[in-house]
Amino acid sequence: MEDASRAFGFSRAKGYDLVRRGRFPCRVLRIGRSTRVITASLLRVLESGKPEYNDTHA
């Protein structure tokens, strides 16, 4: 999460806030108390510039 947030120019706190609201620009997995960024989604979003929220399907 920290690296992905930094790639988008967000602080760590802002990244987690966006995840909680379902608005982080790429797909994430919540596993227990952990939050993991899906690397393929991160790369697609960084390449295309189009957000890929958890509620949308590629």
Image (spheres, rainbow, N blue to C red):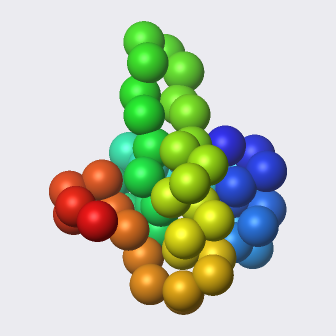
Please say whether residue 13 is visible from this viewpoint: no
Height in image: 50 above or below 42?
below
Percent position (x, y) of residue 48? 54, 86
**Which residue: 41% across, 28% down?**
30
Height in image: 37 above or below 11?
above
Of 7 and 17, nearer the camera is 7
Number of callouts = 0
Percent position (x, y) of residue 44? 55, 71
Height in image: 20 above or below 48?
above
Please say whether residue 57 is visible from this viewpoint: yes
The residue most toward the top is 32
**Which residue: 75% across, 46% down?**
2
- The quarter of the rendered structure image containing the N terminus is top right
Q: Quadrant of residue 42?
A: bottom right
Percent position (x, y) of residue 28? 45, 44
In-image side of 13 versus 31 (left or right): right
**Which residue: 30% across, 53% down?**
54
Q: Quadrant of residue 58?
A: bottom left
**Which residue: 43% across, 18% down?**
31
Percent position (x, y) of residue 56? 21, 63
